Structures are given as structure tokens and as C-alpha cells.
Amino acid sequence: MPTPAGIVSTREVVRRWRDSIEGQVAIRGNLYYIAPGTTAIKVARRAVTPSDNADGLTPFTPLATVNEFITNRVVTGEGDVGVLMKEGQYVLSANISTTKKVFILMGAPGLNRRSVFVDGVTGAAALILRGDHIQLRNLEVGGAADAEAAVTVRGRYFQAINVHFTSKDVDIARALAGLRIEVDLLDHPGFSNLLGCLFSYLDTGLLVGTPNPSGSGDFNTITGVRVEDCIFQRNTTRDIGAQAGARIDGWLIARNYFADLGNVDFITLNHADNGGQLINHIADNVFAHNAVTTTQVVLTNTTTAFKFTGNRDKAGFITGV
């Protein structure tokens, strides 16, 4: 039967969706579609009712929750992709902690990251990701616990691209951090890429977490993280910080914008053993503050652990911290 005038065929809709997603990421496993809840949505002028009992494999049979995708559909190591189809609030039925690896959760191409909300449940981190090779892309994650980060990462090779890390509701609880990268003796994370992200309305934007459990030497060190082209704003304590015992090697913090005009501590990385094997570069960042002081950028072992160059505040280039 021919497709009615003005209606795109089902096969063509599926092809267009897949092509747009493959333009941004590699789909090596299954591609799952996720809607913001069970309320009916329109896909190519057709009414579609999302359900976690659906197969989730086409835009016309979407899942209803992020929980279903990560908990029940992702096969570890297969490269599955979950795409959040529509603007809206994707409320977690429970905060997610997983050891699964090699998967992607992303907002659909063309959506504004701040219109695709993944909201945590009060009392814990929204997402604890312990597997390797996990990517978040083009979405917002809101934490709902003042003692937890919105997202905690304990696996290697994590990527966040164009992600907004924030608090679900600052009037109820300001999340401890937007993203916490933790050392775990079983997981030993590192080599994360944080590209074009926004960290706002948090206690601390990006937090290097306390080792869990605490070890010594290299086991306490997070290596090779790139923080590039990000914006930090409206965070109450600091923008980038570290908890007790956490140290960093070989980090690149470059071309970021620290937007607060007040007395926020922008960067505090003060472990005595920072840069034990690899120097950390903090370069070409812009600080909106009039004149950044040594209490606002605190770097321990600045002569051996950090290269601080090309950074500017409103008064001009910062010559030292």
C-alpha cells in the first residue's frame, strides 16, 4: 500500500534517524530509542506510546526510561547506543550504578543539551559508571544529593561531550559535584575526555574523588584527563577541586571559561604528589574575575607538577599562581 501524501514511510523515518545518529557516534551494537516517560509522543506524525516492554529498536517502538536501557538492554562490551528522542525530563526510576562497559547515552542530534534532562533520585548519585569506554553526549544530568555528584566515574576512557552537569533543584539540594572522577583500586580510572561541557549550580563543578578504598602511590593517581572548552559557572565552593588523597598526573585543562565574578575558588589541586610522573598543563583559560589571586587558583608543586601558561583574567594575562 502506498504511503499517504505528506507521510514519510516507516522505513525512511528509521533510516533518517539512524543516519543522523551515525553522523556523531559509531553504532557497534544495538541502537535504542528512549522517550521521556510513557506519555504518547508524535514520530513523523504518528502517535507512539513508549513502553519499557517495547523492543526500543525503532523510533516507533521506544523505551520509556533510561533505567531500562542501561539496566536491561545494554550488553556490556557490545557498543550499544541509547538516544533520548525528545525534549523533556527523563526521570530515573532509581539511581543507576553499573559496571557495564562500552556504551553511549546521548541526546538526539539537533537538541539543545539543556532541554534533555536526566534527573537523579534524591539521596545518591544519578549515575555511577564503573565500566570502561562509556560516553555521555548532548544531554543534562541533574544530581539530587548534597553528598553525591550528579555523575561518578570509576572506569577508564570515559567521555563527556557537550554535557551539562548540574543539580536537579538547587532549592532542595545542590549536588556535591557535577562530575566526580574517583580512584577505585579495582577500576583505576583515567584518560577521560571532557569536551565542551557546562558545569553549573553545583558545590564543585569537577571533582577528583577520594580513593576508595585508599591505596598508595599510583593507585591514588588519575592520569591523562582532558578538560577542554568547558564553561564553569554559579558553583558555590570551586569549579575544579580534589578530595583528600586524590592526585593527578598528565592532565590538560585548556581553553575553558570560568565565568564567576565573585570569590569562588576556581581551581584547587593541592596534593603534594601531583605530577609524580607527568606534568599537568593548565593553559589558555579565561577567568571572568577582575584579578585572580593565589587563593583562587591553588596548585601544589607548581614548579614541577604544573605548567600554568597563557591564562587570562580581566586584568590581562596571569603571570603566576
Image (spheres, rainbow, N blue to C red):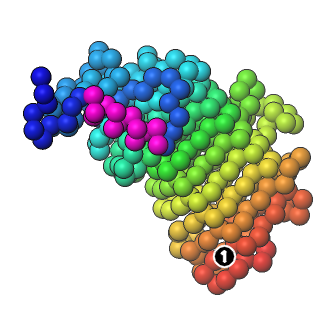
Residue at image position (48%, 20%) is: 74
**In the rendered image, the vertical position of residue 131 relative to residue 249, given as above or below:** above
| Of 294 and 159, the residue lying toward us | 159
Q: Is residue 259 left or right of residue 303?
A: left
**In the rendered image, the vertical position of residue 211 relative to residue 200, given as above or below:** above
Image quarter of residue 45: top left
Residue at image position (33%, 38%) is: 16
| Of 134 and 297, the residue lying toward us | 134
Spot occupied by residue 43 in the image (x, y as percentages of width and height): 21, 35
Q: Is residue 315 left or right of residue 269?
A: left
Q: Which residue is mark 1?
A: 312
> What range of the chain is rendered magenta?
11-23
Of the 4 image quadrants, the one containing the C terminus is: bottom right
Residue 276 seen from this side? yes
Q: Secondary structure at mark 1?
A: strand
Spot occupied by residue 31 in the image (x, y as percentages of width and height): 42, 27
| Disc 1: CA contacts within 10 A as few (<14), some (14-19) or many (>=20) | many
